Amino acid sequence: MKHPMTRELFAYWNERRGTRPAPERHEIEPGAIRNVLAHSFILTLGLGHELEFRLAGTRLCALFCRELKSSSFVELWQEAERAEIRELGMTVALEAVGVVAGVAGTTSEGRVELELLLLPLYHRGQLDQRLIGLLAPLAAPHWLGLEPVRALSLGARRYLGPAAACAVDPEEMAGPGIAALRGVTIYDGGRS
């Protein structure tokens, strides 16, 4: 996760869920995530696996120069990628995994790089109805918000399963048979 807001929302979501696959929608307190609210959103998973904005933050709406509430999340993407985005949303909801992805958007002024986070939420005991997410620019050019971002395109993505919550610094793991070297962990073993 590159963006500090992405890390903040993921940490809060992870803390709220505890040992469950996801927290309940009502457990998400807006005041606790006030630093990321402007770029965050909640999606409803509807009939036909459509993803619709239930709530959208003010800065997120400003990126597209319009109110996003009740509009389609999938329609923000290039037409060739819409089925993939729909499938991505279904995977997050039904398999209770998160996803973080690089996203590119264009305006008449230029290209903007963004980071997307999608996380599942329980809603009234069901896991297949709500997602919480965040879409934030990695850098904010001075022209951002003057022209709407058009046709998002999906870049590299990474699924966030239970292992992501248990990420351990290799320095903490160093011990007999384990060596940590600048981002690389070497485990003794293998062929004799």
Image (tube, rainbow, N blue to C red):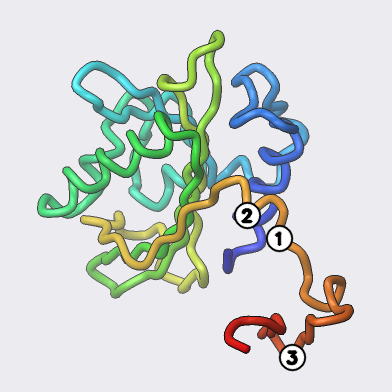
Residue 120 rendering spot, x and y as whole percentages: 51, 33
Residue 178 rendering spot, x and y as whole percentages: 79, 81
Residue 189 rendering spot, x and y as whole percentages: 67, 82
- In the shown orientation, is residue 112 left or right of residue 187? left
Q: Residue at x 48, y 21 (%)?
A: 127
Q: Residue at x 72, y 53 (%)?
A: 166
Q: Residues within 10 Å of mark 3 (few under 14, many from 20)?
A: few
Q: Which mark is residue 164?
A: 2
Q: Earlier in the sequence, mark 3 or mark 2?
A: 2
Under tag 1, what secondary structure?
loop
Under tag 3, what secondary structure?
strand
> CA–CA distance between discs 3 and 2?
20 Å
Q: Can you tell which quarter of the image residue 151 is in?
A: bottom left
Asked whether the residues under the numbered discs 1 and 2 touch, taking CB atoms below 8 Å apart as contact, a structural biologist would say yes
Residue toward you, 29 or 21:
21
Kind of residue indicated by mark 3: Leu
Q: Earlier in the sequence, mark 3 or mark 1?
A: 1
Looking at the figure, which quarter contains the C terminus?
A: bottom right
Asked whether the residues under the numbered discs 3 and 2 touch, taking CB atoms below 8 Å apart as contact, a structural biologist would say no
Residue at the far front in the pictured view:
192
Mark 1 lies on residue: 167
Kind of residue indicated by mark 2: Ala
